[in-house]
Image (cartoon, coloured by chain):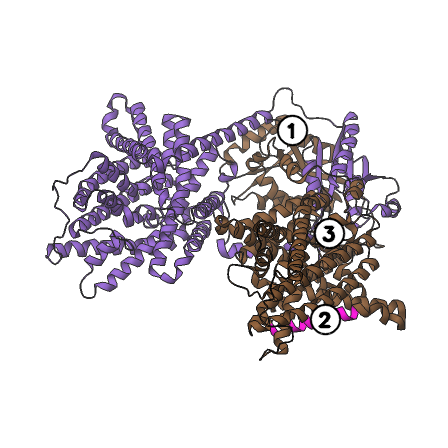
Chain colours: A purple, B brown
Amino acid sequence: MKNIKKILVGQPLKSTDDDSHLLTKLQALAMLSSDALSSIAYGTEQIVLVLLTLSTAAIWYSIPIAILVLILLASLTLSYRQIIKAYPQGGGAYVVSSENLGDNAGLIAGGSLLVDYMLTVAVSVSAGADAITATIPFLHSYNLEISMVLVLLLMVMNLRGLRESAGFLLVPVYTFITATVILIGVGLFRIATGSLPFNATASIGTFVPGVSMVLLLKAFSSGSASLTGVEAISNAVPFFKKPKAKNAAATLAIMALILGVFFSGITFLNYWLGIIPKAGSTVLSQVAHNVFSFPGGGALYYIFQIATAMILAVAANTGFSAFPMLAFNLAKNKYMPHMYMEKGDRLGYSNGIISLALGAIVLLFVFDGNTERLIPLYSIGVFVPFALSQTGMVVKWHKEYGKNFLKHSISNIIGAFISYAIVLILIALRFKDVWPFFLILPALIYMFYRIKKHYVQVAEQLRLTEDVHATEYTGNTVIVLVGNVTRVAVGAISYAESIGDEVVAMHVSTKETKHKNAKVEAEFKEYFPDIRFSIVESSYRDVVRPVVRFVDLVSKAAQKKGKTVTVIVPQFVPNKRWQNILHNQMSIRIRYYLGFKDNVIVSTYSYNLKK
Amino acid sequence: MKNIKKILVGQPLKSTDDDSHLLTKLQALAMLSSDALSSIAYGTEQIVLVLLTLSTAAIWYSIPIAILVLILLASLTLSYRQIIKAYPQGGGAYVVSSENLGDNAGLIAGGSLLVDYMLTVAVSVSAGADAITATIPFLHSYNLEISMVLVLLLMVMNLRGLRESAGFLLVPVYTFITATVILIGVGLFRIATGSLPFNATASIGTFVPGVSMVLLLKAFSSGSASLTGVEAISNAVPFFKKPKAKNAAATLAIMALILGVFFSGITFLNYWLGIIPKAGSTVLSQVAHNVFSFPGGGALYYIFQIATAMILAVAANTGFSAFPMLAFNLAKNKYMPHMYMEKGDRLGYSNGIISLALGAIVLLFVFDGNTERLIPLYSIGVFVPFALSQTGMVVKWHKEYGKNFLKHSISNIIGAFISYAIVLILIALRFKDVWPFFLILPALIYMFYRIKKHYVQVAEQLRLTEDVHATEYTGNTVIVLVGNVTRVAVGAISYAESIGDEVVAMHVSTKETKHKNAKVEAEFKEYFPDIRFSIVESSYRDVVRPVVRFVDLVSKAAQKKGKTVTVIVPQFVPNKRWQNILHNQMSIRIRYYLGFKDNVIVSTYSYNLKK
């Protein structure tokens, strides 16, 4: 077990190793941008698909819509750069919203993102599996299995630690960036040299009968789904090398630039080439096919396809960086279990990584790999936190700069405005897809508050008050569970005699073992003539109940005399892990049930088996 | 949780309630015969299918083959009646073989049956699901799910206890018996009155070109698969009301009689009507269709179909009675984990019942519900123990009666001979289906011996020898794990002071909590100025390793002085079960790893949270 863990996860690292494991900008871009960049693969298509419900001529509207998406991208980028600088300890929507808008807003943002990262992983990974099986068709019936393997692969990679996963991601991310730069470059060059004829379904500005605001808004909301990965870097500032905030802000700017250029380039090429989505082939694949339609271009086309498949497959990784940090921040504020604060052997937040992987696998399983219908849900889940965090920044600037806040918060205001607009559009036009959001979120927030309430109550119960004093006990009563008279029994009784002034051996007898009682007692008396040997008759086959009842009796008598009560339960520690199933089933149950008794201390006398 | 268990499983029963829960013959027949009787549904078909590979004319051979099956049934019945009388404590092939032929033979028989019961459950339940969905076609795509639900239903029923499951089974078993009696009765009456014309594909004795011994043997081995349920009653003698052996033997005789009459009746009707298996309809269903082909007979046909579906669905129950008893017998001899000897709340061997259900569900899942191809495997798995137990009986009679053993063992000899023949036929003619048997069985037997060896070694290690004496300790060192200074810490230290002459508070500090060390120490000193407060620095984020290292150091020093070492780990016992996830993750790990230290006693100081 331990060795398997070492092979998969690697040698444990010391906390002080932390710094060497931080990310350079190059690595961080690989680690954190895969989600945003991969949306290039479907962003334009989403817009065109909506416009096509009217007519092919409407495709030209994708150009103005793309410009609006770019404005949103710019304002989100500026705003998140501010957030990074203002919250260098890892901000993100949760921290910004809760600090500036209050707990509820923070929890809405945090809860949305928590679910969103699971959705991202499920959606991205199944898109990746689709892309892989489109390239290698004979794997087609194993889509779901490939998705799950990808999730597990990403999980293991992330458990191994940051730098390793970044290293692993360098290849797909930079291959995709290079391939897309070549695609757009070749495309524009061929347009400039006239070897790619203008073939748009209708020129920009053509009047299209029946065009409506609703349609354009729908197309815009679909297109803006491409921006869902922007949040990730602001969550992950602590993972950067120093100066953390500066490096993170720079990385965000680079990512936004790449995203903007790619998105507008592909949207433009698509318009120019007049491409209409068709079954079995994506818009992006058709763009590439057209652009590379020159002798020798086939190889480039093939490389581009593989690069797309790879970026989709690893897009889920963004969630693996962001989710554990978010869970950590929520746990720190007692809204999630403390276990999300523990770092694993390799300094990642293992519990967060594992929870995310499990959640995504459940989603994949439930939706049988058909996760496309989750996209609108996932959009609302990311634009709500966007809107809240921008609003939070406006409030923050208002607090800090008073009346002069406007000039600092202009990008936040624009970003917030567009984000709220998208949320409203999604609710108004896509309610049948996004309604689960309004069930899941309140349930999550209820859970957060329940957990917080519990931790607060526990702290109150544990707090020392005036009336709490150390107790002076008059003695110790020790009960030892004795089966047969063996080395274990002798050892346990010896220990009991050293800590207790009153020792009782408790032997549990069932109908089947009753005939041996006398023999066991005689053997016991030979070794410990002065110790009380109590036989607990079990009229149920169950041993636990009579044991608890006996301990209760002894405990009441002991408490009257001001004594402590200790129950010693022997446990075998086998040499090999599988042998555990052969032992201790009973001890585990007895220990569990005695745990419910206050004032009874349960001790485990471990006997390590050598063979 | 407890309430759910009560609703599903029922109130716990006392051991003394045992007798009232034993089975009458009527109940036992319902409980234990469903497997054997359900084979009526496919026994004849199996023979006919093999014969048809030659020609339709060969169908008449099913009559002499059926006679041979009846002889085998008679000899098995007589032999198992002897086994029941000789081993009234619940014999079965495992006990008979190991007592008379040695451990290896016993384990071969036991191992075969263990796997076989899992196969039975999987095969029967999926046949039942097929029959159900044949009647209710819109459920067809949920075959696998229905199978699993049936397994879980049978599991819960058996966890509820014997009598309840027998009660539940009375309806399907006796409905099927009644319906089949009507079928055969009406069929014979209509033949006698001439209203069912003779329509055989060829009369008995007709020469069929190409007929071969191999074909007939194959047909015979397929037909004898119907007898696989005969073993069950001999395993379950202890479940009968007194006089146990007599009642069990009588039940076996009744079952064999019903089985013989049904099998020969249906085989004869099939021959007479000249029925040829066709897709989408079983032979039995066609027989019923023909026999009930008179005005008003449609209702009878429909009832018969439902009865068949029901008996198939509950046939798996036989395995649920027999498997836990077999596992108990193996566990008693230390070949399986002790936990199979524990009775549950309702006096069934819960662990056996649950293991069987899980095994069957795994088989269903792996074979995706298409379990027909498991049938030959399952036949060899039952005829090997048949052959061994009969041989065992011959050996036993020889020991008891010396030279006169022959007259007592004639039925055993015939039974053994035919069983060995079937095993040889299966190996010779069906090796491609039965080969896994020769992998699984050695693996199981290896496992049995490993488990036995382990238990024997443990017993040796625990045995008291001359040199073992009670130890006189000079004192007690107690280490208390202290996080913050709370009520729990004060309580735990008070307890520690009462049992130890040397108490150490161990505070674990991580990079994140380091700044609070001084404050915690000051608070602690206020309450316990005389107790050593040790801060364990954790350079790993992991708390467990430094704790173990610190305990090791203290433990070495204490042992030199002849003192015991106790580590007190506080544990929170939350009010509600779900809250467990919010606590104790760390304590569980610390306790687990300290369990590997001999001479370190780990004590749990439980603090029950009230809110």
x, y (%) of residue B551? 64, 44
Q: Out of A467 and B27, give the one closest to the viewer.
A: B27
**Image check: A426 left or right of A151?**
left
Question: The residue under label 1 is which amino acid type?
Answer: Val
Q: Residues within 10 Å of mark 3 (few under 14, many from 20)?
A: many
Residue A22 shows in this picture: no
Which stretch did the figure color magenta? Answer: B412-429
Whether label 3 touches label 1, CB < 8 Å: no
In the rendered structure, does residue B549 fall within the stretch colored magenta?
no
The residue that label 1 is drawn on is B490
Question: The residue under label 2 is which amino acid type?
Answer: Ile
**Image check: B409 left or right of B264?**
right
Please check whether the numbered discs 3 and 1 fall on a single chain. Answer: yes
The residue that label 2 is drawn on is B418
Question: The residue under label 3 is which amino acid type?
Answer: Leu
Q: Distance between the residues labelled 3 and 1?
A: 64 Å
Q: Nearer the viewer, mark 1 or mark 2?
A: 2
In the rendered view of the protein, which quadrant contains the N terminus of chain A? Answer: bottom right
Residue at 50% from the left image edge and 33% from the top image edge: B515
